[in-house]
């Protein structure tokens, strides 16, 4: 039996107060999804909610620090209590605390830890609390926002902590997709490309609308859609 899509689709998008996360949230709202934006603090939540409410009323924003296990659990509990069980999770929160010329031998352990706490462990924490709720729904879409810099297929030098954290996020995608196979939950990674955001900079060739498109498409996949894959521009790419 193919699990039916929940009548009220509720999405969590982390790091949704600006840039790619905000655009993903806006596009999901336009697809009649109720979006809960996860932001680092109250001020960022207020700014995000103002932007989201300019599109519609089907949005809320709540503070969450994805590097804090207890904070993540409180956040997910609050989402479920106030709005219902989420059927969509976009792990977008991410950091890039090093330069593009950074090298493995010069990168302090503290930078590796900081990067992994958000880019990998943040997603792990979110999945750990959201997946059980999706299992009860027998429906779920998890989208991990990765990067071309995390492709082992063409791995190069520079930004080692960021690269390895995103490659690890891709490994998480594969592992979790295998674990939940047959449960109605689809798990995929995507690379938005080089996007004009605070992280990508003004010289990036892609708009946030272009960068967000594949993530939103993955959020809205039908029940026979792909899982355990890596995408850019709605097409699978090598790991």
Image: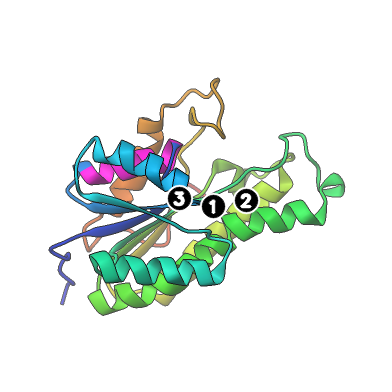
Residue 42's mark?
Answer: 3
Give the residues in magenta. Answer: 19-29
Label 1 crowd (10 A; few <14 / some 14-19 / many >=20)? some
Of residues 72 and 157, the one nearer the viewer is 72
Q: Is 46 left or right of 83, judged from the image as shown? A: right
Marks 2 and 3, how far apart at CA: 37 Å
Mark found first going from the N terminus, 2 or 1: 2
Residue 12 coordinates in the image, percent (x, y): 35, 57
Residue 6 coordinates in the image, percent (x, y): 17, 66
Residue 170 coordinates in the image, percent (x, y): 53, 57
Residue at screen point 16% across, 61% down: 8
Query: Cβ–Cβ below 8 Å for labels 2 and 1?
Result: yes
Label 3 crowd (10 A; few <14 / some 14-19 / many >=20)? few
Query: Cβ–Cβ below 8 Å for labels 1 and 3?
Result: no
Residue 152's mark?
Answer: 2
Residue at screen point 28% across, 71% down: 81
Residue at screen point 29% across, 65% down: 86
Q: Is 169 left or right of 237, judged from the image as shown? A: right
- Is 16 one of the magenta-colored residues? no
Q: Which residue is mark 1?
A: 239
Residue 67 visible from this viewpoint: yes
């Amino acid at each position: 039996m193919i699990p039916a899509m929940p009548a009220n689709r509720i999405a969590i998008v982390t790091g949704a107060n600006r840039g790619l996360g905000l655009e993903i949230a806006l596009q999901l709202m336009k697809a009649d999804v109720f979006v809960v934006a996860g932001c680092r603090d109250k001020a960022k939540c207020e700014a995000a909610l103002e932007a989201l409410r300019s599109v519609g009323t089907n949005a809320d924003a709540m503070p969450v620090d994805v590097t804090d296990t207890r904070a993540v659990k409180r956040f997910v509990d609050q989402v479920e209590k106030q709005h219902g069980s989420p059927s969509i999770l976009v792990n977008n929160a991410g950091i890039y605390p090093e330069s593009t010329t950074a090298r493995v031998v010069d990168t302090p352990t503290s930078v590796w830890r900081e990067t992994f706490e958000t880019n990998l462990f943040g997603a792990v924490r979110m999945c750990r609390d959201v997946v059980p709720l999706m299992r009860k729904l027998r429906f779920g879409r998890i989208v991990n926002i990765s990067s071309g810099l995390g492709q082992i297929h063409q791995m190069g030098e520079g930004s080692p902590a960021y690269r390895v954290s995103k490659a690890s996020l891709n490994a998480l995608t594969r592992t979790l997709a295998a674990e939940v196979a047959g449960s109605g939950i689809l798990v995929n990674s995507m690379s938005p490309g080089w996007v004009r955001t605070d992280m990508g900079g003004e010289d990036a060739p892609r708009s946030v609308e272009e960068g967000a498109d594949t993530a939103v498409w993955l959020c809205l996949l039908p029940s026979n859609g792909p899982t355990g894959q890596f995408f850019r521009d709605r097409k699978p790419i090598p790991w």
